[in-house]
Each structure stands twice: as structure tokens, then as C-alpha cells.
Image (cartoon, rainbow, N blue to C red):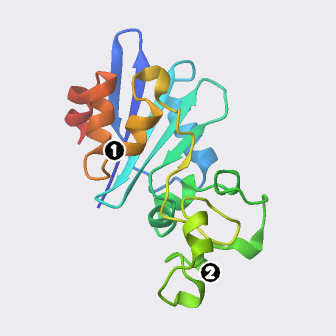
Amino acid sequence: MYFAALLARTEDGWEASDTELDDVETLSDLTDLAREVSDEDTVLVLIEQEDAWFGVVRVDGEEDPRIYVSDAAAAARSSYGEILLTDELLGRDPGDDDADLDSLDLDGTEDGEPGESEDDEEDQGSVSGDAVSHSPVGDRYILADLGVSEKELLALDEGDALSTIAEALGAAEVLETVR
């Protein structure tokens, strides 16, 4: 089950709106959707797949969007997650067709064989051009100036992350109205 909402910071505080992502196919579409809400203020797009992953896209006026995804591998298996997992975010060269998400080894082992070598342990938590790990990716400081530090963001549990973020922003009540 998915949930997506827009939080826009205004002079009067945060305003929330439930949003449908059915017509959103790219990060550019998602950014345009956020800018329709407010083209000057900070807008946060909050997306979660229950108990699997969550993502935050921050749009500040005309600046490029900033993205954070809690679990890249889980998000890669989701149509909404694929929107957020850009080549840049995953550390791949743009347009690298060899790193198609459908062909990725998402369990972190070679050829799907169980087991982990010492080299795998060192690389765990990093994203290569050929694999997506179960680690967070993106801008870990995306909410730092709004009251959620990098450490707090990384410690969030996927099950209640958006509520915790909204509470830290002082927007818990408005988010709950659209949930």
C-alpha cells in the first residue's frame, strides 16, 4: 500500500494535500506537481510503501529537486520508487542502459547465490552501477534545516517515518488530515 502527500511551507505554516501519482512518470513530472502547489516556497513530496521504504523529494522554488530514499533496493521494485531513483542518485552514468533496474541483483549476492564475502561486507551500503543495495540513497541533509538531522533521518523506521518527519516539522496534524 502506498501513501503520497505534498507538504508546502507557507507563511501560515505547513499545508498538506493528498496526491495521486498515477500520472507521474518521471522525476520532472513529480517536480512539476510540487511546483504547482507553490513555486516559491519549500514543498516536500512524501512517499511511502508501507513497512518497505519511504522517500522525500524537496523542491525549493526553481532549484533542482533534492531526494532521499530510505531503502534503494526496495524502492527499485516499486513503480513510484523508480521515479526517485535517478542515475545520479544511484551513482550511475546517465543513460547507462546496461544498469536496467529489471536486471539488477537486488539480493546483494552474485548469481542469486546465498552467502557474503569479505568484499561484499565492505561494499554494503554503497550503490554501484550494477547493483542497488538496501541502504539509503540521496541527500541525507534534505531536512536538516527543517529540524530533522541526518542521524535522525537515517534512524527512522519505514513504518512510521512520514509521521515522525511531519511531527518534527510541526506538520503532524495537517499530514494526518490527508492520510
Q: Residue at x 26, y 38 (%)?
A: 163
Q: Which residue is mark 1?
A: 156
Q: Quadrant of residue 119?
A: bottom right
Q: Which residue is mark 2?
A: 103
In the rendered structure, which amino acid carries the disc numbered 2?
A: Ser
Quarter that holds the C terminus:
top left
Tell whether label 2 touches label 1 (CB within 8 Å). no
Label count reads 2
Q: Quadrant of residue 124?
A: bottom right
Q: In the image, 147: left or right of 118?
A: left
Q: In the image, 103: left or right of 38?
A: right
**Which of labels 1 and 2 is toward the front?**
1
- Residue extending farthest to the front is 118
Of the two numbered discs 1 and 2 on the same chain, state the one appearing first in sequence: 2
- Residue 43 x/y as whole percent: 48, 28
**Relative to 51, is 151 above or below?**
above
Separation of residues labelled 1 and 2 (CA atoms): 29 Å
81 and 68: which one is in front? 68
In the rendered structure, which amino acid carries the disc numbered 1?
A: Leu
- Residue 84 x/y as whole percent: 55, 52
**Relative to 73, is 162 above or below?**
above
Quarter that holds the N terminus:
bottom left
Q: In the image, 9: left or right of 160?
A: right
- Residue 146 x/y as whole percent: 43, 22
